[in-house]
Image (spheres, rainbow, N blue to C red):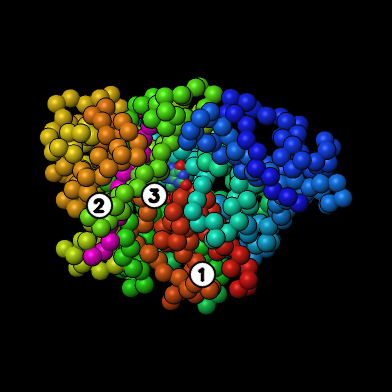
């Protein structure tokens, strides 16, 4: 087998025959010499000259074994198998459940939020009525924080697992096969819910269980393993709660704890029980929104055409010894309120598969380490979490609503309040604010210097047409739930597998999914 790189102009969508012919030409072999091929990657090159796609293709020639397509392991019927409790139905929990099915163990998924369709109503209500349902929102519910997102599927943590397995599972459950080859693959919020629903149906069809509206509020160690104590939530009214017999208990030898970075009550629970957790650095800053046409113009050097993908960017610089970087960029996306409780202001971004809104948004954030917030040291392992909560509250209090405090980019860097604000995709609305004073000083000062620096890499980026909105604060978990690096079990709680972003071992959809798979495999190995 050989790997060949071939190039086609971006305006040309080559057929399989075109790809094979180009590979044969590149290898200088006769037509018909290639007996099978597989496109491994496709990446856009807009650096200079004509905009083109580079294809990396594996080919097998006559006399060689043909290239075998990637095959997923089959899912087994696990109705009568040993149960494993999974708390959280985000990417970490879902992919752990799918791996357990392949390994012949029975996943019991407990999720505090609603199923993906019911969840949509709560999110619409949030934008309209500005009321957060603490159990059903942009972070909580089936599919976790990644369901109503941009659905970007690239990661730097390729060493943690096999990204092909994750992408092939997404395709198996209905995602566009193009994600298997795009270097910057994404699914989109309009397509993800169906894919997630198909995953859930498969878990149930194979004998696993998925329980929604099931908020895990405690863990109790037993001679046989663990009990997860569940309180039913999202009940139609309080009378229904009174009619219930009380809390439900689910038992298993092992629990995968995949509750995500916003499950603050889980950190509080661990802290109150004296179970080991640690403060962890995370990043905080603003969401930046530009007109997408401006970003297209910069990235394609004025040569943007509708057949090209909506332009993205990724920026990083050092300011006063600390990294300032763009995070979770959503081309053609919108800004959404991502708080999980009343009285908090939190922003995030999402896009549909077409990435066709008028706006480009991205987090631009500064790394915060525990030593940056010594005044919170008294909170022990919750030190950075308390800082995060205070900043979110402060932003909420400024507008006394989920209207986002906002400032034009150049005004922010100069330290002047914006007289007016450009139109934004953020539905709950914006309110002019002195973000240069509202943000923690070590964050504001670095951001003020970073934006003109970014302009050196992307000319036109530093402009008053761009709006900064606060606050982007849920970039990763501010707490780590530490685990043994070999067994993946909690340091002092055998049978508890801290997993995914909430435990501090992943960031993003793909790496959380990989971590879920790794925890499931460890449970099988440790059986
Ligand atoms: C709006 C938005 C856009 C994003 N866009 C992208 C993107 O494009 N690409 C990308 O890679 N990443 C993106 N992310 C980040 C990504 O979603 C997360 O990194 C990923 O979802 C983390 O996976 P997880 O399974 O570890 O946790 P989560 O997805 O956070 O899932 C945790 C689940 O646990 C449940 N839970 C919490 N506590 C309990 C409890 N006590 N009992 C029962 N259930 C509980 C929650 O309801 C939730 O469903 C985005 C996030 C948001 C909010």
Residue range in magenta is: 357-371
Q: Nearer the viewer, mark 1 or mark 3?
A: 1
Q: Which residue is mark 2?
A: 319
Q: Which type of secondary structure does the marked residue at label 1 adopt? A: loop
Can the viewer see residue 338 in this picture? Answer: no
The residue nearer to you, when weighing 163 against 338, is 163
The residue nearer to you, when weighing 265 against 436, is 436
Residue at the image point whose x is 64% and y is 27% from the top: 13
Which is nearer the N-term, disc 1 or disc 2? 2
Q: Which residue is mark 1?
A: 488
Give the quadrant of the C terminus: bottom right
Q: CA distance from mark 1 to mark 2?
A: 36 Å
Q: Which type of secondary structure does the marked residue at label 3 adopt? A: helix
Q: Which mark is residue 242?
A: 3
In this picture, residue 301 sits left or right of residue 464 = right
Which is nearer the N-term, disc 3 or disc 2? 3
x and y, in percent, of residue 7 in the image = 62, 35
In this picture, residue 164 sits left or right of residue 453 = right
The residue nearer to you, when weighing 50 against 270, is 50
x and y, in percent, of residue 290 in the image = 33, 30
Q: For disc 3, does the CB lie below 8 Å from ligand 1?
A: no
The residue nearer to you, when weighing 415 against 113, is 415
């Amino acid at each position: 087998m050989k790997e060949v790189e071939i190039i086609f102009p971006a305006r040309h969508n080559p057929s399989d025959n075109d790809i094979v012919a180009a590979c044969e030409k590149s290898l200088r072999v006769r037509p018909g010499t290639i007996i099978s091929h597989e496109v491994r990657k496709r990446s856009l090159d807009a650096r200079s000259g004509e905009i083109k796609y580079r294809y990396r293709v594996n080919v097998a020639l006559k006399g060689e074994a043909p290239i075998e397509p990637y095959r997923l392991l089959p899912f087994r019927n696990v109705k009568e198998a040993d149960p494993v409790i999974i708390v959280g139905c985000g990417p970490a929990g879902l992919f752990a459940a799918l791996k357990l099915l392949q390994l012949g163990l029975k996943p019991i998924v407990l999720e505090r939020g609603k199923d993906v369709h019911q969840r949509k109503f709560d999110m619409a209500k949030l934008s309209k009525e500005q009321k957060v349902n603490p159990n059903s929102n942009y972070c909580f519910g089936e599919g976790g924080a990644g369901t109503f997102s941009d659905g970007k599927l690239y990661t730097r943590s390729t060493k943690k697992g096999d990204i092909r397995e994750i992408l092939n599972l997404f395709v198996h459950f209905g995602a566009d096969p193009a994600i298997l080859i795009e270097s910057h693959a994404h699914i989109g919020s309009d397509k993800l819910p169906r894919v997630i629903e198909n995953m859930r149906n498969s878990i149930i069809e194979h004998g696993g269980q998925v329980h929604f509206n099931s908020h895990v509020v405690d863990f109790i160690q037993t001679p046989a393993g663990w009990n997860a104590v569940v309180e039913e939530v999202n009940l139609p009214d309080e009378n229904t709660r009174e009619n219930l017999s009380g809390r439900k208990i689910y038992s298993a030898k092992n629990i995968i704890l995949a509750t995500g970075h916003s499950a603050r009550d889980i950190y509080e629970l661990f802290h109150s029980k004296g179970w080991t957790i640690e403060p962890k650095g995370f990043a905080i800053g603003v969401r930046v929104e530009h007109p997408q046409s401006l970003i297209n113009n910069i990235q394609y050097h004025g040569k943007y055409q509708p057949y090209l993908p909506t332009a993205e960017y990724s920026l990083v610089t050092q300011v006063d010894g600390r990294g300032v970087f763009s995070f979770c960029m959503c081309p053609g996306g919108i800004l959404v309120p991502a708080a999980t409780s009343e009285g908090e202001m939190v922003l995030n971004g999402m896009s549909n598969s077409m990435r066709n809104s008028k706006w480009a948004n991205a987090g631009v954030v500064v790394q915060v380490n525990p030593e940056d917030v010594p005044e919170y040291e008294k909170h022990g392992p919750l030190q950075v979490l308390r800082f995060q909560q205070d900043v979110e509250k402060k932003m909420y209090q400024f507008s006394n609503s989920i209207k986002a405090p906002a400032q034009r980019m150049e005004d922010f860097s100069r330290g002047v309040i914006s007289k007016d604000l450009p139109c934004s995709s953020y539905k709950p609305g914006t309110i002019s604010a002195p973000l240069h004073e509202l943000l923690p000083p070590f964050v504001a000062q670095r951001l003020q210097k970073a934006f003109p620096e970014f302009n050196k890499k992307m000319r036109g980026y530093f402009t008053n047409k761009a709006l900064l909105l606060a606050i982007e604060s849920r970039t990763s978990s501010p707490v780590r739930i530490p685990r043994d690096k070999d067994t993946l079990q909690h340091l002092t709680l055998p049978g508890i597998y801290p997993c995914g972003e909430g435990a501090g071992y992943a960031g993003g959809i793909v790496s959380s999914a990989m971590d879920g798979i790794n925890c499931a495999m460890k449970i099988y190995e440790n059986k």
